[in-house]
Amino acid sequence: MTILSINNLSMSYKKQKVLDNINLTINSPGIWALVGPNGTGKTTFLNTVTNLIPATSGKVTLVGKPNTDTSVFKEVAFLQDNTVLFDYLNGYDHLKYICEVQKINKNRIQEVAKYVGMEKYLKKTVGNYSLGMKQHLLLAMTIINKPKLLLLDEPLNGLDPTSAILMRKILLELADQGTTIILSSHNLSEIDRVTKQILFLKDGQIIEEDMNQHETTYYHFIVSDLVRAVKLLTAENYQIGQTEHGFKVVLGSHLLQHLFDLLKKEKIDILDVQKEIVGSEKRYEEIFEV
Ligand SMILES: Nc1ncnc2c1ncn2[C@@H]1O[C@H](COP(=O)(O)OP(=O)(O)OP(=O)(O)O)[C@@H](O)[C@H]1O
């Protein structure tokens, strides 16, 4: 079944066209990141896809049904920003409300609270939650119905490293269990950790890219004799770039072992070596001409 199908989707606020004839089909579980500079229309895209804001034109189907059919929300969930929360209710009340509306067994409340790490403050009033605690609650609210399609608008906002690691684990687990996830985020290094599939939003259009094709691996070296090392490796056709304390190299067809052997033969000591994978950030710079 097609999980998400978008046909000729356009959306304008008065005269400002934000989404311009977008087409996109997703047929499988996995994670897609929605990326673009501030104000490019990521939130508008997610709101329009879920029909929270009606499109100017175009058609969207979610898990095989038109997005105008509100019963899709039994299988689709959308994490919006925390303005959807009620300050005077506690976390439990929010989750109970969803269980009642969607006829979900209330045993699921404790289960999901534990899963997202918010058991301790489940009964605390949301007005007293921190930004990160609100994100936990929003996540719990969106996954409580075990959705097939999960749309997340900036889920990493305000998360401390512990919560960001947990969020990453949860997203990867859900995708592994068959959920299709689209998340918008500005955190490109975190995106690189959860997916290679990126939807760049530019000029109202989606550019879908597989980062496997755009990744570059650099090795950063600090050596005992930088000048000689650079001369030696350049003569051997290595692509060398100077860094603050050493050099970086893209190995291409060369082998790391070959480089080690060359340096060893010339009695140049390797004091440090670190691997760096440059993925979506580089592609972002190219697409958005940073
Ligand atoms: N309710 C609205 N009425 C009029 N214009 C709007 C409205 N909401 C958003 N816009 C405009 O639409 C454009 C896209 O906004 P949107 O919030 O979708 O971008 P975004 O990519 O999610 O931004 P950010 O990364 O800053 O969250 C912006 O120019 C914004 O000013």
Image (cartoon, grey):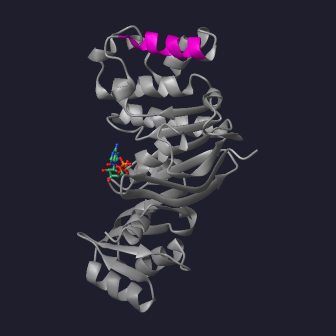
Image height check: is 62 above or below 253? Answer: above
Front-lying residue, 241 or 114? 114
Q: Residue furthest bottom?
A: 235
Place of residue 195 in the rendered image (x, y in percent of width and height, measured from the top left) = 54, 51
Q: Quarter holding the C terminus?
A: bottom left
| Residue drawn at 70 percent across, 50 percent down | 27
Q: Residue at x 57, y 40 (%)?
A: 172
| 155 with respect to 61 (left or right) | left
Extreme residue toward the front, this view: 14
Residue name at image x 61 percent, y 23 percent: 145
Which is more toward the observer, 268 or 50?
50
Decide whether residue 90 is among the magenta residues.
Answer: yes
Q: Position of residue 12 (x, y in %)?
A: 42, 53
In the rendered structure, which segment of residues is drawn in magenta? 89-101
Residue 42 x, y percent position in the rendering: 42, 50
Residue 245 is situated, as x and y percent measured from the top left of the image, at 24, 69
Q: Quadrant of residue 285?
A: bottom left
Vertical comparison of 34 with 212: above or below = above
Furthest residue in direction left, as rendered: 244
All told, the count of numbered labels is 0
Judged by its main secondary structure, the magenta piece is helix
125 shown above or below 43? above
Quadrant assignment, res 209: bottom right
Which of these two is toward me, 225 or 177?
177
Does the magenta segment cover residue 232? no
Q: Quadrant of the N terminus?
A: top right
Q: Residue at x 50, y 44 (%)?
A: 48
Residue 84 occupies quadrant: top left
